Image (cartoon, rainbow, N blue to C red):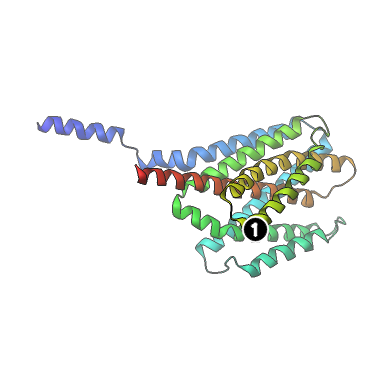
């Protein structure tokens, strides 16, 4: 009898998930996937375009990487420190820094100043994501990692599609995407009064679709602007950063909704 119980305990321990395996599933493996897609994007930059465009894209994606790090620092500051908290004042600050960046022309001598504006905008954008991240972490912390991995995969995949496509192939999407964006803004305003769940869900998923379209469009537009003489890689990286944050925010909300609906079904069962 004792031998049978010992054997059963060993079997349970054998099939139990160790903390290291949980770490691999929740964090290590997703981060490895992010690394792989980033390597794929880097390889694509080396082989898909001529040298000047390739160097410009390196600068753009370098600024984009710095911006995402700055946004992560901003989110960390809101969630884990008392130095600065997201508020209406920081929202106005975000808008002010964005206007400062857009109204400061690139003259070749003010790159550090404009880069500071870009990183400041990214920091305050990450700070603004703090309340949403706190809510998501209170439900399931793994959603944040999943959303980050999903955002990176989606962003890199659509970027590679744009880089490998023929020059200007996806630029026609600009008018369609802007029209859809205007319609979404209109319906969002209308839904302030209707409070329709259907309109909200449609707006959420359609918004994700539109932002993914903007990733392709903005990437090809950056290349086209470079061919036309624009070397402002800081402003070009701003467009991609806004796309990246948009995809991440939408995935956070969608995954959180799915997790809440899953918990609700479990309670009913």
Q: Which residue is drawn at 34% across and 38% down?
A: 17
Q: Which residue is drawn at 82% across and 37% down?
A: 172
Residue toward you, 60 or 5: 5
How far across and how far down the image is residue 109, in percent?
A: 85, 58
Q: In which quarter of the image is residue 228?
A: top right
How far across and how far down the image is residue 82, in percent?
A: 52, 69
269 left or right of 189?
left
Q: Quadrant of residue 123?
A: bottom right
How far across and how far down the image is residue 157, in percent?
A: 66, 35
How far across and how far down the image is residue 110, in percent?
A: 82, 60
174 left or right of 186?
right
Query: In this figure, which residue is indicated by the disc labeled 1?
Result: 125
21 left or right of 81?
left
Residue toward you, 111 or 87: 87
Q: Residue at x 59, y 65 (%)?
A: 86
Instruction: Say what secondary structure mark 1 lies in.
Output: helix
Instruction: Name the image quarter holding the C terminus.
Output: top left
Q: Compared to 132, does 262 lie above or below?
A: above
Which residue is situated farthest in the right direction here? 228
């Amino acid at each position: 009898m004792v031998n049978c119980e010992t054997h059963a305990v060993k079997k349970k321990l054998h099939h139990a998930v160790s903390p290291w395996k949980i770490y691999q599933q929740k964090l290590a493996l997703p981060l490895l996937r992010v690394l792989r897609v980033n390597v794929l994007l880097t390889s694509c930059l080396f082989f898909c375009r001529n040298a000047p465009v390739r160097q410009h894209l390196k600068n753009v994606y370098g600024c984009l990487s710095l911006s995402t790090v700055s946004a992560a620092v901003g989110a960390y500051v809101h969630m884990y420190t008392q130095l600065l908290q997201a508020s209406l004042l920081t929202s106005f600050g975000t808008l002010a820094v964005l206007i400062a960046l857009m109204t400061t022309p690139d003259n070749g001598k003010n790159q550090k100043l404009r880069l500071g504006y870009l990183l400041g905008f990214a920091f305050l954008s990450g700070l603004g994501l703090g309340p949403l991240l706190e809510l998501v972490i209170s439900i399931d912390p793994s959603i944040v990692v999943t959303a980050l991995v999903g955002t990176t995969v989606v962003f890199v995949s659509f970027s590679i599609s744009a880089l490998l496509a023929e020059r200007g192939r996806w630029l026609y999407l600009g008018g369609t995407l802007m029209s859809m964006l205007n319609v979404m803004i209109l319906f969002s305003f209308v839904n302030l009064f209707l409070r329709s769940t259907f309109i909200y869900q449609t707006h959420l998923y359609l918004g994700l679709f539109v932002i993914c379209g903007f990733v392709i469009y903005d990437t090809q537009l950056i290349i086209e602007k470079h061919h036309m003489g624009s070397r402002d890689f800081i402003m070009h990286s701003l467009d991609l950063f806004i796309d990246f944050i948009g995809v991440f925010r939408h995935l956070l909300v969608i995954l959180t909704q799915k997790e809440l609906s899953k918990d609700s079904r479990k309670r009913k069962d």
